Image (cartoon, grey):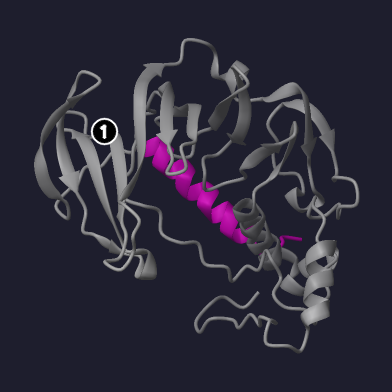
């Protein structure tokens, strides 16, 4: 018997197969990118990211800590799929990835059953991985992004950054309420449309004694990957990988030591929800309780 979601999966597979027959296969190119983020509090973060020309291709990010690069994130199908993050050498799914999985399983087996398998009381709101969660829009511009349309940005001047001739573009100031306003500038390569640098400058309100503050993100370099992607997009051999039951047969990147949950966690979700349940039960019936209402027109799971 086909599950509720299976016809949709089959239709998508047939459509993709038909498109593949109509269009010649394209070669996927892999790169690695070194990026530096200098934050407002004086903290500098250096990250090395591996990615591909396929938007649904694998992504791996390493953070520079204690004099060496340590794997921090692994996304086998891009940031819109199952994304794994590292915490003390243990990889678990991100909240966004769990929300997407809850949506998928809710269509297949029902939302109430998913909540029950997650160990969440049915009369307690909100469920942290509700399928009604709305993801915020991704920023159009930022260091490391490619921006083909810049019509909404104001041209400030020109500059050469790391040997790249760039237009310096500025976005409209963003109102931060009592914190003042923020102005973003981008160093945009006219030839490749790649954004090499971004500055975020915060101007305090007129009543604040604080001076303006600035954070900077910039890409040092982008290079083709010379080693096999199969050797790159995998978990470190010594890492623990929490593989929860909600994955239900979906592929998991190779490597690592697989486990069903963290100590004290729920095997279906792979994480412990007990602290949040305890808190919400304590404030239940007070003004701190949050009720999740299904948005008008949203799918009925």
**Near-viewer residue (270 or 209):** 209
**Near-viewer residue (94 or 8):** 94
For the point 70% across and 36% down, the residue is 252
Is 296 above or below relative to 87?
A: below
Per the image, is 20 magenta? Answer: yes
**Near-viewer residue (129 or 9):** 129
For the point 90% across and 46% down, the residue is 263
Residue 169 in sight in this render? yes
Per the image, is 94 magenta? Answer: no
Q: Along the horizontal axis of the image, is 139 left or right of 227?
A: left
Q: Along the horizontal axis of the image, is 64 left or right of 187?
A: right
Q: Residues within 10 Å of mark 1 (few under 14, many from 20)?
A: many
Residue 144 in sight in this render? no
Secondary structure of the magenta portion, mostly? helix
Which residue was labeled with disc 1? 194
Direction front: furthest residue: 209
Direction top: furthest residue: 226
For the point 22% across and 36% down, the residue is 187
Is 163 above or below relative to 276?
A: above
Q: Along the horizontal axis of the image, is 47 left or right of 5?
A: left
Secondary structure under the numbered disc 1 in the rendered image: loop
Residue 231: % across, % down: 61, 16
For the point 82% across and 33% down, the residue is 258
Quarter of the image for the N terminus: give it: bottom right
Residue range of the region highlighted in magenta in the rendering: 1-22
Residue 114: % across, % down: 77, 66
Residue 163: % across, % down: 20, 18
Direction right: furthest residue: 264
Quadrant of residue 35 in the image?
top left
Residue 91: % across, % down: 72, 37
């Amino acid at each position: 018997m086909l599950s509720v979601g299976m016809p949709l999966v089959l239709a998508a597979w047939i459509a993709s197969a038909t498109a593949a027959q109509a269009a010649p296969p394209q070669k996927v190119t892999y790169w690695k990118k070194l990026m530096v983020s200098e934050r407002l509090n004086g903290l500098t973060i250096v990250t090395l990211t591996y990615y591909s020309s396929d938007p649904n291709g694998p992504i791996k990010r390493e953070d520079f800590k204690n004099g060496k690069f340590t794997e921090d994130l692994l996304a086998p199908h891009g940031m819109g799929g199952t994304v794994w993050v590292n915490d003390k050498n243990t990889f678990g799914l991100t909240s966004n990835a769990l929300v997407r999985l809850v949506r998928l399983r809710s269509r297949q087996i029902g939302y109430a059953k998913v909540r029950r398998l997650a160990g969440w009381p049915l009369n307690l709101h909100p469920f942290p991985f509700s399928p009604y969660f709305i993801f915020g829009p991704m920023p159009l511009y930022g260091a490391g992004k490619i921006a083909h349309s810049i019509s909404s940005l104001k041209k400030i001047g020109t500059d050469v950054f790391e040997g790249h001739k760039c237009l310096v573009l500025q976005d409209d100031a963003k109102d931060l309420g009592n914190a003042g306003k923020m102005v973003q500038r981008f160093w945009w390569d006219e030839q490749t449309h790649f954004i090499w640098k971004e500055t975020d400058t915060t101007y305090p309100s007129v009543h604040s004694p604080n001076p303006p503050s600035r954070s900077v993100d910039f890409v040092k370099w982008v290079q083709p990957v010379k080693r096999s992607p199969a050797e790159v997009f995998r978990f470190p051999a010594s890492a623990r990988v929490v593989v929860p039951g909600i994955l239900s047969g979906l592929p998991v990147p190779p490597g690592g030591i697989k486990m069903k949950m963290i100590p004290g966690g729920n095997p279906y979700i792979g994480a412990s929800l007990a602290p949040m349940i305890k808190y919400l039960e304590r404030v239940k019936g007070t003004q701190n309780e949050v009720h999740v209402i299904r948005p008008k027109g949203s799918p009925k799971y």
